[in-house]
């Protein structure tokens, strides 16, 4: 009996190609160990292809799931099959994990620590429980057993903690010697290694002083990426004179801030950022609603001479009581070429001809809310002359606006805009921005924004506006608006890319 054509084709594949396919399949699965063992059990040819390429076994992801049996034996076999290759090890520890199993797995890794290239230990508590886990003391003891990891380049220790506070001071005891370490990510635990020779550093809940931060910068002169979620800085500029700290190699800076003290004023310790000089930063990310006054807490915007990408995540540009207004500071970043707006009020940063010029109003239960809503979003259309194309009139108005010499163009170098929003009004803002700014060449959209452009917008007197729901039409005197595929109109002007890359700070 002759084999089927498909079987002949699979059998003819060389072992190197099969190994590449296996590696792609393992990377896309939740855990590489069960996947690889299943591949190697299909046939003798597949088993030979898997065993002949030790690099295939060099990425080890261990999810400590109860359904995964003989886990310690699987890790031992995988480490043996990786032979002399450097390997990456990721341990995902749920709250219900057996710490005896964790200890056994880590002891196996320690036996091969001279080949360890990347180590990631991540605690995964249940959604209803945000307490810190796993036991950091036990993990520290396991790391101390390793003593020295000469090839370790990337270290991630991520333990869920609702109130993380991590110091940058020298640990009382260094648990691990890693002379090749260049990337360190710490959440919810004290660093087991010194901050020396780093190129990428991410610490959630950092609380440090001017001296500790300066020592880290001096010890890591090639630092190119700095990610500081829930930042806490403990220094008061009003009581002492401090020298500026320059980080010349830094290219990526991502920040979010811890909540301020119970008083309404922002903690003055944030002013340490104003002493940090980052002239070569190309990517700046600000996340969270607790952003302080940037004009007082950061370097002069004119110092960002190489900044190209600005990413704003869940940003409140104007505070509820006007205590913070960062519009002027953000607009002064004149070198921006790519703007990424993730659930941030875009129209307040770059107003268009169809954006209200007044300051944003916060939601209230006032009886006048419906009147303001009607006037702001659904103005009554004016008389339309016969043969007058509303799109042509919108383009003419945009051209007149862009040619006006009285207005200062915000972000004159802007070429790309990314938008992720739950509001149809901001999707309409994006269309009018592209209409008024012909230099914009690319737009990246989230699925929600794309749906708004397809089905939630319509044309009123040549102006793209949100289509009112039936409930609002009954409650508020609004004109009837038919939905229009605005995404099709947008594609005629710019390149559309579906999907937005993840930022440095998780939201």
Image: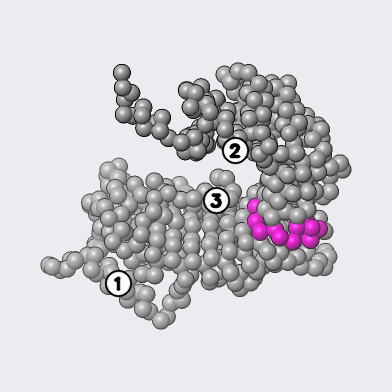
First along the sequence among labels 1 and 2: 2
Residue with the most extreme right position = 172
Q: Position of residue 23 (x, y in %)?
A: 52, 36
For the question of whether residue 380 can be seen, the reply is: no
Residue with the most extreme front position = 1
Q: Position of residue 270 (x, y in %)?
A: 71, 58
**Number of numbered discs visible in the structure rendering:** 3
What is the crowding at mark 1: few (fewer than 14 residues within 10 Å), some, or many (at least 20)?
some
From mark 3 to mark 1, how far is it between C-alphas? 35 Å
Q: What kind of element bears circle 3?
A: loop
From the image, tell me which residue sits under label 3.
503
Displayed quadrant of residue 164:
top right
Q: Position of residue 110 (x, y in %)?
A: 75, 32
From the image, tell me which residue sits under label 2.
55
- What residue is at 39 percent from the left and 46 percent from the top? 447
What is the crowding at mark 3: few (fewer than 14 residues within 10 Å), some, or many (at least 20)?
some
Q: Which mark is residue 397?
A: 1
For the question of whether residue 337 can be seen, the reply is: yes
Q: Is residue 351 left or right of residue 67?
A: left
Is 437 or 406 nearer to us in this picture? 437
Is 504 or 419 nearer to us in this picture? 504
Q: Position of residue 259 (x, y in %)?
A: 66, 48
Q: What kind of element bears circle 1?
A: helix
Give the magenta range. 213-228
Q: Is residue 425 left or right of residue 300?
A: left
First along the sequence among labels 3 and 1: 1
Whether 376 is among the magenta residues is no
Q: Is residue 235 left or right of residue 403?
A: right
User: Of the residues tagged 3 and 1, which is closer to the observer?
Assistant: 3
Residue with the most extreme bottom position = 405
């Amino acid at each position: 009996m002759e084999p089927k054509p498909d079987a002949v084709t699979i059998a003819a594949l060389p072992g190197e190609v099969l190994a590449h396919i296996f590696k792609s399949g393992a990377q896309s699965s939740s855990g590489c160990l069960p996947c690889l063992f299943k591949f190697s059990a299909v046939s003798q040819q597949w088993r030979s292809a898997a065993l002949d390429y030790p690099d295939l076994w060099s990425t080890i992801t261990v999810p400590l799931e109860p359904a995964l049996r003989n886990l310690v034996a699987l890790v031992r076999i995988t480490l043996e099959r990786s032979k002399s290759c450097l390997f990456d090890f990721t341990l995902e520890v749920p709250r219900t994990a057996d710490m005896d199993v964790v200890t056994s797995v880590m002891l196996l890794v320690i036996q091969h620590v001279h080949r360890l290239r990347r180590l990631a230990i991540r605690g995964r508590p249940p959604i209803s429980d945000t307490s810190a886990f796993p036991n950091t003391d036990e993990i520290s003891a396991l790391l101390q057993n390793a003593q020295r990891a000469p090839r370790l380049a990337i270290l991630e220790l991520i333990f869920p903690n609702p109130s993380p506070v991590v110091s940058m001071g020298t640990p009382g005891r260094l648990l691990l010697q890693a002379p090749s370490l260049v990337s360190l990510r710490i959440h919810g635990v004290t660093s087991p290694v010194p901050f020396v020779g780093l190129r990428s550093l991410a610490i959630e809940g950092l609380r440090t002083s001017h001296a500790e931060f300066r020592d880290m910068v001096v010890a890591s002169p090639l630092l190119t990426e700095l990610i500081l979620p829930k930042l806490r800085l403990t220094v008061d500029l009003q009581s002492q004179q401090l020298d500026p700290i320059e980080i010349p190699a830094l290219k990526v800076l991502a920040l979010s801030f811890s909540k301020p003290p119970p008083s309404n004023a922002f903690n003055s310790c944030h002013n340490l950022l104003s002493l940090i000089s980052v002239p070569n930063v190309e990517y700046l990310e600000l996340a969270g609603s607790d952003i302080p006054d940037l004009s007082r807490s950061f370097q002069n915007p004119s110092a960002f001479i190489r900044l190209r990408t600005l990413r704003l995540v869940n940003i409140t540009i104007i505070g509820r009581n006007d205590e913070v207004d960062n519009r002027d500071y953000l607009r002064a970043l004149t070198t921006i070429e790519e703007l990424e707006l993730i659930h941030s009020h875009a129209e307040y940063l770059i107003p268009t001809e169809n954006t209200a010029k007044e300051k944003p109003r916060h939601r209230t239960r006032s009886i006048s809310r419906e009147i303001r809503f009607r006037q702001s979003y659904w103005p009554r259309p004016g008389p339309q002359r016969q043969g007058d194309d509303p799109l042509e009139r919108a383009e003419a108005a945009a051209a007149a606006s862009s040619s006006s010499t009285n207005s200062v163009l915000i972000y004159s170098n802007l070429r790309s805009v990314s938008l992720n929003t739950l509001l149809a009004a901001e999707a309409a803002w994006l269309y009018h921005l592209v209409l008024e700014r012909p230099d914009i060449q690319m737009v990246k959209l989230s699925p929600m924004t794309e749906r708004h452009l397809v089905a939630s917008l319509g044309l009123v007197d040549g102006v793209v506006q949100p289509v009112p729901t039936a409930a609002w039409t009954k409650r508020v005197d609004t004109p009837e608006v038919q939905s229009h595929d605005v995404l099709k109109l947008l594609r005629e002007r710019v390149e559309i890319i579906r999907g937005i890359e993840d930022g440095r700070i998780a939201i």
